[in-house]
Image (cartoon, rainbow, N blue to C red):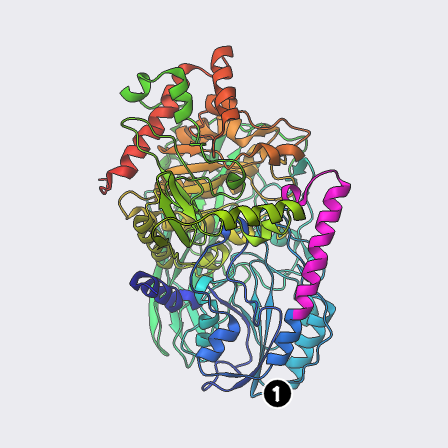
Amino acid sequence: MNGYETEHNAVMRRFGAECTVLLKTDGAFPLEGPCSVALYGSGARRTVKGGTGSGEVNSRRFVTAEDGLEEAGFTVTSKEWMDGYDEVRAQAHKRFIKQLKRSALKRGTLAILTCMGAVMPEPEYDLPLSAGGEAAVYVLSRISGEGSDRSPVPGDILLTETEKRDILELDRRFERFLLVLNVGGPVDLSPVTEVRNVLLLSQLGGETGNILADIMLGRSEPSGRLTTTWAAWADRPDTGDFGGRYDTRYKEGVYVGYRWFEAKGKKPLFPFGYGLSFTRFEMSAGAASVRDGVISIPVTVGNVGERSGRQVVQLYVSQPQGRLGKPVKILAAFGKTGELQPGEKETLTLSFDMRDAASYDEARAAWILEAGDYVLMPGSSSADAKAAAAIRLDSDAIVKKVKNCLGKPDFADWEPGCRSVSADGLPVIPVEASAFTAETVRYGYEEEPDAAAEGMTDEELCLINIGAFKRSGAKSVIGNAANSVAGAAGETSSCPGVPPMIMADGPAGLRLSRLYYRDGTGAHPIGGGMPESMTELMPAPAAFAMKLIERGKKPEGAIFEQNCTAIPIGTALAQSWDIRFAEICGDTVGDEMERFGVHLWLAPALNIHRDIRCGRNFEYYSEDPLISGSFAAAVARGVQRHPGCGVTIKHFAANNQETNRYGSNSMASERALREVYLRGFEIAVRDGAPRAVMTSYNLINGVHTSERRGLTQDVLRSEFGFRGIVMTDWIIGALNMGAKKYPAPNAARIAAAGGDLVMPGGRSDLKAMLKGLKSGAVTRWQLVINASRVIRTARLLNAKERPE
């Protein structure tokens, strides 16, 4: 490996255990040293490093659980079982692909167009547990990805009968047994709750297997905490819809994730923020204070166990129930200690602006702090947070005046009538509403036009407003439309004085072709660049023809490498609750962007874990907007430390299912959208200053996000203060065939809404934009403003100078 690869992988290994969550322990782990181990499960050899689709990373190095244990000195005794499982799974996969093709043909379409991202549930098997050893490990793996949602079936969200049987049998048979969850999202563990040791390993990129070995040997400590509630499938949130063919109603309103469970009074298997350690901690809160609207409370953490470790401190606030119903509590701040030795203590001061605890009042189109007690509740999870102090507001305070601009659904939000946490017996700090001055947002923000844009012809303006499309087509479907960097997702059009911006997909590292060659027309992947997961869905004649075409391509001259680091998936990264590590991951990606000539990373992704069935949740951070926005901002800062490198936060907004993702309409109230689904983006913009924002495929209340000016112009630019470029997700005409109820996005309408780039770009987009210009659907002035933003960003990222 190259020096940078070795260095980057070493960093991921050193910090990776921080992303893992110890769910159960009886003290049997860590082990004293390497030993003989019976290794079982779907992920023993077929360990998953991350999800499919844009989240895939073509890295040189990936260490499986089997590899990692053997490299650490363990003797794996269950090779025969793993060989047998490989054969069972291979046969099941062949049947699965045949069924996908057969089903697509019955619907009159092709599997490659409608089944992208489909994931096979893990199969049942009949294999004996005959291997012995001093310890046993069962690695339960699940994979999901772009284009398909998860299902509550055995082998996906539910355990198979053979998984349940073998996990329970191993726990009974071995004194030291560890259930390892190599998953990107929750699975229903209710049938195996008696298992004594459970580790949520998650999917940690290239070093996954080494990190597991390090934890088992006590070389690293699992210090992660859950960022999504884990519950039995029977106890899942069911107030709102999910997976509607066209319309999905977010009837639960602001009660998402732990807020829903607490409103319902349901106890999950493992609550939000939960996680154990190999050691034990105690915490105590000090006196709270308020200064200029910022609330602070010190919390002292002591290590009272026998091993070193880190603890996460979470601060929740219970808001007063007034005219607006509110959750029992919401996360307001968090922090993580350093490595505490046994007997050592550390005091963290957690702070938040009281304005961030305001609720949105649609009737007044304003953010409001209602009168009453704001109870501060520090703890180590949402379930064990204890009331420590209260801030008493004497009357209602309007902190921000905006306007309703996101449309209305055809229902009223669910209101469970939660009760606030009592302030009785707590120290109370009085605050007057007059201490808060209401900010009134001024709409209609518009940048100054760039002279180069003003001097362009109509067609040149339109070309700047869409991606470079000379090489688009089939490769654009899989995010491989760039000409300058092999395997990059796309690039912007260039003209004299306006250099192109090269974009690479993510979000678990750069997604580029590992091997490529150059000729006079650009950089070309070796091997074609289309993954097997897509070619196997093609009709046999087409797949055969593609192979012949690829064989006929002869690389000319030197062959080059682009080996990128696979970092932990978004959910795993957030489970670290460590902002510093998120910045380190961003710095790793930024370094590789500089090396390979990439200007914009199409990441981080920060949509909310509204429902565990969403196929792309692994890319996203959390069910909580504070976690989501804070980690996206940290990754952005890490990337953008590198001159000429920028991030693209996505998918803006309410992109919470993959079912009919090109034509799905997310129906939600203005309040729910603002408090839950847009809040993280506001934090990311404020604290991370991303260079770009990508809109989502879905509609919001009947209008495509890319065409809703109230979203991209009023909320994003005028309210949030965003000053970068807005681009679409990769709009491919052939893939919009399922969006029958609602019309597909139109390039002219996108531009009129303030969208700067239609990606990946195509001749049909150029025609539509020119037609819209002629009809008045979009003005030349708007195209000039859009183009000006693109031009300024392109110059900035190509200047290779650190901005002031």
Residues shaded magenta: 87-114
Tell me which residue sits at (41%, 24%) in the image. Answer: 463
Tell me which residue sits at (45%, 86%) in the image. Answer: 33
Q: Specify the quadrant that holds the N terminus.
A: bottom left
User: How far across and how far down the image is residue 225, in percent?
Assistant: 49, 63
User: How far across and how far down the image is residue 620, in percent?
Assistant: 51, 50
Tell me which residue sits at (63%, 36%) in the image. Answer: 664
**Residue at far right of view:** 106
Give SS at disc 1: loop
Q: Is residue 624 visible?
A: no
Foreground of the two, 227 or 244 = 244
Q: Specify the quadrant that holds the C terminus.
A: top left
- Chief secondary structure of the magenta portion: helix
User: How far across and how far down the image is residue 401, in percent?
Assistant: 44, 28
The amino acid type of the residue labelled 1 equals: Gly
| Residue on which the image places disc 1 | 132
